[in-house]
Image (cartoon, rainbow, N blue to C red):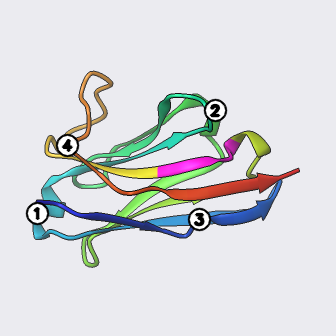
Amino acid sequence: QVQLVESGGGLVQAGGSLRLSCAVSRRTFANYAMGWFRQILGKEREFVAHINWSGSSTYLTKSVKGRFTISRDSATNTVYLQMNNLKPEDTAVYYCAAYRYGGTYDYTREPDYWGQGTQVTVSS
């Protein structure tokens, strides 16, 4: 079983930055691709970012490109989402996700494991 624990959410003003962290419980983190999703109140959960097992390939949804960066640290089994120039429309619960398939982003593949989510609120 893989456990994912997010942290780093909070309240920030528009234009500000936050860095989300996701600690992964298992050594096989090195073989997993990782992702971030978000769920805006009243809407379905949506994809935000993906990173392959080695960190050599990342993919971000269009609305966050140029503002968000996903990265991973295999030494600490942690994946990060650096969020800059935040906008009120980025307000959501952000979820970390792990894929047993470690390759590049494939929209047809669903994550195998989910974290509990962390709230990000951007005030205008």
Residue 72 versus residue 121: which sits nearer the camera?
Answer: 121
- Pick whichever of labels 2 and 3 is earlier in the sequence: 3
Whether the residues at callouts 4 and 3 have beta carbons within 8 Å, the answer is no
Instruction: Write the residue at 17% across / 45% down.
Output: 102
| Of pointers 4 and 2, the one earlier in the residue sequence | 2
Q: Secondary structure at mark 1?
A: helix
Magenta range is 90-94
- In percent of width and height, residue 32 lies at 18, 52
* Inter-mark Cα distance, 4 to 1: 13 Å
Which kind of residue does numbered mark 3 sit on? Gly
User: Is disc 2 placed on a helix, strand or loop?
Assistant: helix
Residue tagged 1: 28
Q: Are marks 2 and 1 in contact (CB under 8 Å)?
A: no
Inter-mark Cα distance, 4 to 3: 23 Å
Which disc number belongs to residue 112? 4
Q: Residue at x 58, y 57 (%)?
A: 119
Mark yes or no: residue 82 visible: yes
